[in-house]
Amino acid sequence: MSNLSATSESSKVQSHGRTEYKMSIGKALAKMWREEGWRGFMAGNGTNCIRIVPYSAIQFGAFNFYKRFFESEPGLPLNPQQRLLCGGLAGITSVTFTYPLDIVRTRLSIQTASFEGLSAQAKKELPGMWGLMASMYKNEGGIFALYRGIIPTVAGVAPYVGLNFMVYETMRNYFTQEGEKNPGVFGKLGAGAVSGAVAQTFTYPFDVLRRRFQINTMSGMGYQYKSIWDALTTIIKHEGVRGLYKGIAPNLLKVAPSMASSWLSFELTRDLLVSLKPMEV
């Protein structure tokens, strides 16, 4: 999914007047392959893999923690509104702990893009994950640099994760055959894909704002935003409402299978751990 992720990130941060990545998904992927090869598709994927493990673990763990405060009795299912709220809180918790890795991942995904403002020498000296993190900390404001864009991120992640948990449970019940307690593998995959796609579509403008703030201080990007409101009005003024949905097509192609496999992995792992638990006598 890294190639689609890189294509999506490049589209999100493409400012008005620049056309390097104003192209179809197929042409964008071909351009990346031609200019950067397989490594271009995998740019930032190592950081993403390092980030996604604690991010997912904290998210699912936090959801189970928060839902205890809303259960009328232990083990009883939550209603949709409660799942939305618990999911939102879990999303905020997980992104707060892993945000520095997220901002580094974004920059790694786009730092090799052929923007005119980047000199040839700058491209040769592009740092890796830890080098980039150290550089941001040293040159862009310390720990605050690693949390740049956290406000629009939280504003988008809370409803995204909340909707994800809420829609997944609804679709999970829909895909469960009559007389069965749980859906099959394909049912779980389908429920995960739908929940991820629905959540991403409703909260996508926040994702665009998040990415743009994360690279707001990078040279050659063509814009500098002073606040969330300034970013929102500037994007709509110069790019229209469509600017808030730049890159949504490759993003949905990435999110749907990604969330499907994530939910399936969670359920299979949970079932395995439950089966290993000693029987009470």
Image (cartoon, rainbow, N blue to C red):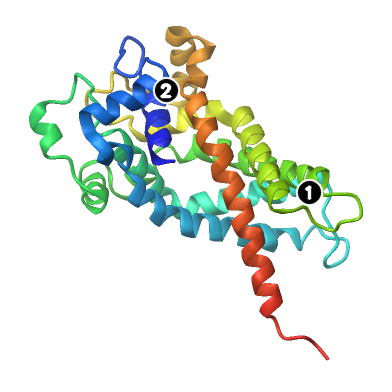
Residue at image point 54% right, 41% down: 154
Q: Give residue 12's position: percent from left, percent from top.
A: 42, 25
Residue at image coords 66%, 46%? 189
Does residue 70 appear anywhere in the picture? yes
Above or below, 188 against 7 in this view is below
Which mark is drawn over residue 25?
Answer: 2
Are there few (<14), some (14-19), or many (20+) residues within 10 Å of tag 1? Answer: some
Q: Residue at x 56, y 41 (%)?
A: 257
Indicate which label's residue lies in the foreground, 1 or 2: 2
Find disc 1 in the rendering and name its residue. Answer: 82
Instruction: Give above or below for 59 relative to 2.
Output: below
What is the three-letter code of the residue carrying label 2? Ile
Report x, y in % for residue 43: 30, 41
Q: Nearer the viewer, residue 216 or 163?
A: 163
- Badge 1 marks a residue whose secondary structure is helix
**SS state under label 2:** helix
Q: Which mark is residue 167?
A: none
Q: Amino acid at mark 1?
A: Gln
Disc 1 + disc 2, Cβ < 8 Å: no
- Direction from residue 248 to residue 147 in the image, left or right: left
Judge from the rendering whether residue 73 lies leftward or rightward of residue 59; answer left or right.
Answer: right
